[in-house]
Image (cartoon, helix red, strand yellow):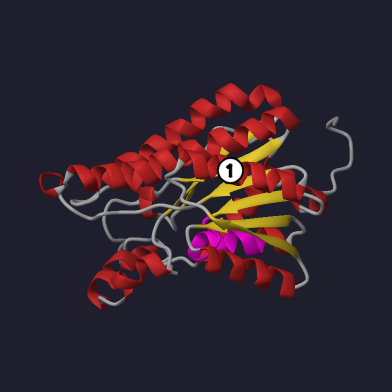
C-alpha cells in the first residue's frame, strides 16, 4: 500500500473471518484473550489442560454471539499433545491465522531449594510448552504463508527478585525464542511476538491478593499504583493478532504499567 492510499484503521483491527487457536483458554489471561479475539470477529478454538474450563469459555463466546469450539484437554508440556491440538484446530477451523499460548507455572523457591523435578517442571511447561506450540502451529502457518503467533513472556524476563530465578530465566528465554523463530519464519508471512505482563489479577495470583501487604507493595511498584486486569493484556494480544501490527515481528510487548520504567516504588511526585 502506498503512502498516499487511504487507510481504514477500523478494518486493521477487525478480526472477522480469522481463525484463532488459544491454548490456556480456561482461565485468566488465556480466557480473556479468547474472549477478546472472539468479540473482534475471530472464530476461536479453545484448549487447556482444564478441558471443562476451555469448553466453558467457548460456550460463553457462543452465548455472546461469537463462534467458538472446545479443543479438548491439552498438556502444553507435551509435544505430542500440542501437535495433535494443532492438527485438530486446523481440521476444525480450516486454517489457523492466530495462535496464542499462555500456560505457565512458577515454583517460587531459591535456587538452593530447587529440586531437579521442580526445575524440569517449570522449564518443561514455560519454555518447552512455548517451543512445542510455536513449532506445531508455526508449521501450519508457514504452509499457509500467513499467521500471527503470540507467546507469553513476563516482566520477570527483565526484572527479578529472590525465588524467581528459574521462572525468570524461562521467560527471558521465551523472548529470545520469539526473536529467533521470527527470523526463521518471517519470510513466509508469519509474525511471532510475545507479551510481557507484570502484575495481573488472575486465579494464579490469587494467593498474593490474599496477603494485603504484599499485594499493595506490588501495586505501588507500578506507576499506575494498581494491579492489571486480564482484559488489559488481552487487548494487547488482539493488537498483535491484527493487521494493525503488521510491521511488528520478533518483539516482546511490555504490559507492565511502568514496572520496568522505575527503580523501586514511585514517589508521590509521579501521581497526578
Q: With 54 as the anchor, is 60 left or right in this view?
A: right
Magenta highlight on residue 25: yes
Give the magenta range.
24-36
Residue under the image location 53 percent in, 28 percent down: 181
What is the chief secondary structure element of the magenta stretch?
helix
Residue under the image location 78 percent in, 71 percent down: 65
Q: With 202 as the anchor, is 16 left or right in this view?
A: right
Magenta highlight on residue 267: no
Is residue 159 visible in the rendered structure shown here?
A: no
Query: Where is residue 162 shown, x and y percent of the image?
Result: 18, 51
Residue under the image location 63 percent in, 34 percent down: 191
Q: With 164 as the anchor, is 65 left or right in this view?
A: right
Relative to the observer, which residue lies in front, 245 or 209? 209
| Residue under label 1 | 84
Residue under the image location 67 percent in, 42 percent down: 245
SS at circle 1:
helix
Query: Where is residue 85 shown, x and y percent of the image?
Result: 59, 46
Amino acid at each position: 500500500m502506498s503512502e498516499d492510499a487511504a487507510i481504514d484503521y477500523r478494518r486493521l483491527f477487525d478480526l472477522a473471518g480469522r481463525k484463532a487457536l488459544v491454548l490456556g483458554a480456561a482461565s485468566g489471561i488465556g480466557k480473556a484473550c479468547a474472549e477478546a479475539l472472539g468479540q473482534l470477529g475471530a472464530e476461536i478454538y479453545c484448549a487447556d489442560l482444564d478441558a471443562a474450563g476451555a469448553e466453558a469459555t467457548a460456550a460463553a463466546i457462543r452465548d455472546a454471539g461469537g463462534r467458538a469450539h472446545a479443543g479438548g484437554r491439552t498438556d502444553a508440556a507435551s509435544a505430542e499433545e500440542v501437535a495433535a491440538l494443532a492438527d485438530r484446530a486446523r481440521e476444525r477451523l480450516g486454517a489457523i491465522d492466530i495462535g496464542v499460548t499462555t500456560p505457565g507455572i512458577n515454583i517460587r523457591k531459591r535456587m538452593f531449594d530447587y529440586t531437579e523435578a521442580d526445575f524440569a517442571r517449570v522449564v518443561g511447561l514455560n519454555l518447552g510448552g512455548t517451543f512445542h506450540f510455536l513449532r506445531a502451529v508455526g508449521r501450519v502457518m508457514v504452509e499457509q504463508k500467513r499467521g500471527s503467533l503470540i507467546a507469553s513472556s513476563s516482566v520477570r524476563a527483565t526484572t527479578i527478585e529472590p525465588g524467581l530465578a528459574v521462572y525468570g530465566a524461562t521467560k527471558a528465554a521465551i523472548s529470545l525464542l520469539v526473536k529467533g523463530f521470527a527470523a526463521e519464519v518471517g519470510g513466509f508471512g508469519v509474525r511471532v511476538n510475545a507479551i510481557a505482563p507484570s502484575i495481573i489479577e488472575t486465579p494464579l495470583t490469587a494467593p498474593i491478593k490474599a496477603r494485603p501487604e504484599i499485594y499493595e507493595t506490588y501495586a505501588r511498584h507500578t506507576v499506575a499504583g494498581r494491579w492489571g486486569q486480564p482484559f488489559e493484556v488481552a487487548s494487547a494480544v488482539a493488537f498483535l493478532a491484527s493487521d494493525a501490527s503488521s510491521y511488528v515481528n520478533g518483539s516482546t510487548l511490555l504490559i507492565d504499567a511502568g514496572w520496568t520504567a522505575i527503580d523501586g516504588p514511585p514517589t508521590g511526585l509521579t501521581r497526578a
